[in-house]
Amino acid sequence: MVKKIIIFIVLFFLTLFSVSAQDKTDIEKKISEYQTKLQELKQQKNTLSSQIQYMDTQIYLTGLQINQTEQQIVSTGKEIDLLGSRIEGLDQSLDYLSKQLIKRIVIGYKKKPLSLFALLLNNKNAYDFLNQVKYLKTAQTNNQKLIYTVQETKTNAEEQKKHREEKKIELDQLTKRLGNQKIALDNQKGQKERFLADTQNDENIYQNLLTQAQAQLAGFGRFVSSQGGSSILSNQTVCDDWGCYYNQRDSQWGGTSLNGTEYTLAGAGCLVTSMAMVYTHFGHRSVNPQSINSNPNNFASYYPAFLKKTITADGATSNRISSDIDSELSTGRPVIVGISYDGGPSPDHFLVLISGSNGSYQMNDPFTPNGHNIPFTDHYSVGSIREIDRISM
């Protein structure tokens, strides 16, 4: 009966292990499958339905990755518990063996060491003599084995403790990863909701919005090329009574991806940087280009490199509203203007006008090196202005 119970328990745990291993393999297989599917969807033509399918696939993939991480957390926790049990057993063994070794050392210390001549004299015959010699050799061998066992047990316990600490670090990392994955999932779900709201689930609206966004980013690229590229600069930030001047190419953030896209702040961050400067003018001195760039909600759901008219930074929400230059500057409020350097109908660069009137303006140019409080017409013409926005917050 006992034998049957033991066999049942062994089979039960083997089955559990098999199921757990199968679950792990299934999740890994699905993750690989949906990663491939996601890459295939990227290559498809940009349509409303393909974009929704891409978002749904991304959401499902993130859910799978969360399940995988949760399984790893459970598995790692069990490993830590098992290591704890092993360490406890080794510590008990080490304690017992150490006590036995001390007893033998004490006994050996109390006995006077005898020479072979003394042993011969103390024994009545050769048989007793040989037995005594054999006993002493056996005792010595056993003591050496005990010393080795104590050392081996101690080493094993230390290795297990080190392994447990490594597993604890791994568990912390997995827990952080799970938190980040859950945040990513919430962001992806929110992005899909915004996408459906922005496009009104209408193909024509989506295509018009997409064309507008793509045109703006393409314009930024042409402007940067016309200026010789977006090389990184150093020590550009200047703060004064007006606020702070930032340069999109500053080494502090220039190489950073624009909201996780293939664009960078150095090459396409003129509008983001201009908005950051205006925020500092209105008292939000902690805001910089990175502050705005780090919030994905500030960018269009249909084109993540396109900055929305309404954004939030430092807890303050702002809106870009079409306005007039001189009426705003006369009240001390800056304006953001979009200029067309190549003469086209749409802006290809944005900057901040901070003072002036009647075409004579001072600007903070986020692209020009040391572009703090410099004359606008030294670099651009008034006729190149295509967009004028005041900032309401």
Image (spheres, rainbow, N blue to C red):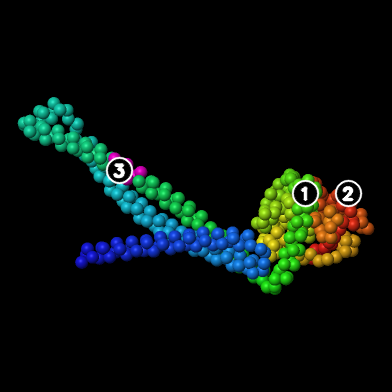
Q: Secondary structure at mark 2?
A: helix
**Magenta residues: mostly which secondary structure?**
helix
Report the side of 60 relative to 103 (left or right): right
Q: Residue furthest right?
A: 358
Which residue in the structure is indicated by mark 2?
378
Report the side of 18 relative to 71 (left or right): left
The Cα–Cα distance between marks 2 and 3, rounded to whole angstroms, is 83 Å
Looking at the image, which is closer to me, 70 or 354?
Answer: 70
Q: Residue at x 85, y 65 (%)?
A: 323
**How far across and how far down the image is residue 341, in percent?**
84, 53
Region of the chain picked out in magenta, as a range: 148-155
Q: Residues within 10 Å of mark 2 (few under 14, many from 20)?
A: few
Q: Is residue 149 magenta?
A: yes
Q: Residues within 10 Å of mark 3 (few under 14, many from 20)?
A: many
Report the side of 213 relative to 329 (left or right): left
Residue 48, located in which quarter of the rendered image?
Answer: bottom right
Residue 24, compared with residue 113, is above or below; it is below
Of circles 3 and 1, the one toward us is 1
Is the N terminus in the top left, top right, bottom left or bottom right quadrant? Answer: bottom left
- Determine which of the numbered discs, if any, sits on residue 225 in the image: 1
**How far across and how far down the image is residue 156, in percent?**
35, 46
Which residue in the structure is indicated by mark 3?
150
